[in-house]
Image: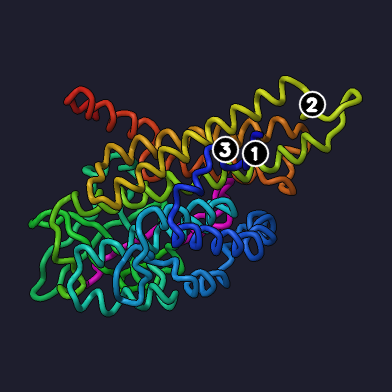
Amino acid sequence: MSRKLDPMDLYDIRSELSEDEVMVKDTVARFVDDNVIPLMQEAFEKHEFPRHLIGEVAKMGLFGSSIDGYDCAGLNGVSYGLICQELERGDSGLRSFVSVQSSLVMYPIHTYGSEEQKQRWLPAMAKGEAVGCFGLTESHGGSDPSNMKTHAKRDGDDWILNGSKMWITNATIADAAVVWARTDEGVKGFIVEKDMPGFDSHEIKNKFSLRASITGTLFFNNVRVPDCNVLPGVSSLRGPLSCLTQARYGISWGVIGAAQACLDEVLRYTQERILFGRPLANTQTIQIRLADMARRITSAQLMSLRLGRIKDSGDLSPTQVSMAKWNNCRAAIDIARDARDILGGAGISAEYVPIRHMLNLESVITYEGTETVHQLVVGKELTGVNAFG
């Protein structure tokens, strides 16, 4: 006899997980079901990030979860991916917060920072006592970080930082920003603290995507940064790009959760919605569309699980991450759009999750490298030719 398959896991990915990975997934899933999903509609509508969740996320050890020591959980890469998947099933905004804190702030401090920097910031960020943001993107640069205008010059034992950054998650609530700037010694990372004179941030309002997330602009006007706040371990674009690889990895898992939320919604809806005398789910057209959603989700799950195993073996290539980010974001946004369409008029209501996920995914498919950027990364790997520019 054939057994009943889980509609959200047709290839039984769960059976490929270790006991610890299953425990992580189930713990975060319960948290999302009980504490995130019930409030995200209102948070999205009000354009507010639910800051009270920061402490709860910290208690579960989700910040910097892949870091050993410094009060971090020391989990493997697959566990981090599962964390992202379950959080984004709630909302991309919450997953973005955790991604930035973990992959874009704690990761570079742990990888490139001094021991003093690690001791000062990592435990505080792991506990949610300090919030970080990541300053790389500039308004004129977008997908071309080599076009960076923000710069810093030595002045005795300090650096004088000038410039601006845009589209920065956590900008106005961050206690510290890891800011990348040009110097005479290469591209360096600066830990800019919120109370440093000349450092300012402004929230970007009226977004129609990631409304339950804080996005802003950073400004640096002759900010004096002591040399002890400079990450000593890197002096090139390799620094910020390696951070993006970590974040993109988490995104490749996260969007699976958003897609699952949309499929789950339309599965229920089409079984309850009666048109022309029968449930929508009983029609060939709807079943084909639902089956295509499941196919895309399954493909994404298999790709991310394999990517996670490669990551945990220490052999991860940025090209492999680009492939997964490209594939999985495209799958998720197409699923969200089709789910919105299947819901008909109800699809434009925030009482149903697809419109919220659809709008959020417009940002997710764009940030940390647009779809085109990742296509060209893979193209360069295949041909050996750099077609950027």
Q: What residue is at 36 percent from the left and 48 percent from the top? A: 308
Disc sitting over residue 282 in the figure = 2
Q: What residue is at 31 percent from the left and 66 percent from the top? A: 67
Q: Dot 1, how many residues are within 10 Å of its Cα: few (below 14), some (14-19), or many (20+)?
A: few
Q: What residue is at 56 percent from the left and 42 percent from the top? A: 9
Q: Secondary structure at mark 1?
A: loop
Q: Dot 3, how many residues are within 10 Å of its Cα: few (below 14), some (14-19), or many (20+)?
A: some
Percent x, y for residue 38?
69, 60
Q: Which residue is mark 1?
A: 3
What's the distance in space between the residues labelled 2 and 1, CA to CA? 21 Å
Q: Which of the marked residues, 2 or 1, is nearer the chain's N terminus?
A: 1
Q: Secondary structure at mark 3?
A: loop
Discs 2/1, front: 1
Q: Is residue 90 left or right of residue 196?
A: right
Badge 1 amino acid? Arg
* Residue 156 visible within the image: yes
Q: Which residue is mark 3?
A: 10
Percent x, y for residue 20?
44, 62
Badge 3 amino acid? Leu
Discs 1/3, front: 1
Q: Is residue 353 left or right of residue 100?
A: right
Badge 2 amino acid? Asn
Range of residues picked out in magenta: 202-225
Image vertical order of residue 222 relative to residue 297, above or below: below
Which residue in the rendered view is the most extreme toward the front? 1
Q: Which of the marked residues, 1 or 3, is nearer the chain's N terminus?
A: 1
Q: Dot 2, how many residues are within 10 Å of its Cα: few (below 14), some (14-19), or many (20+)?
A: few
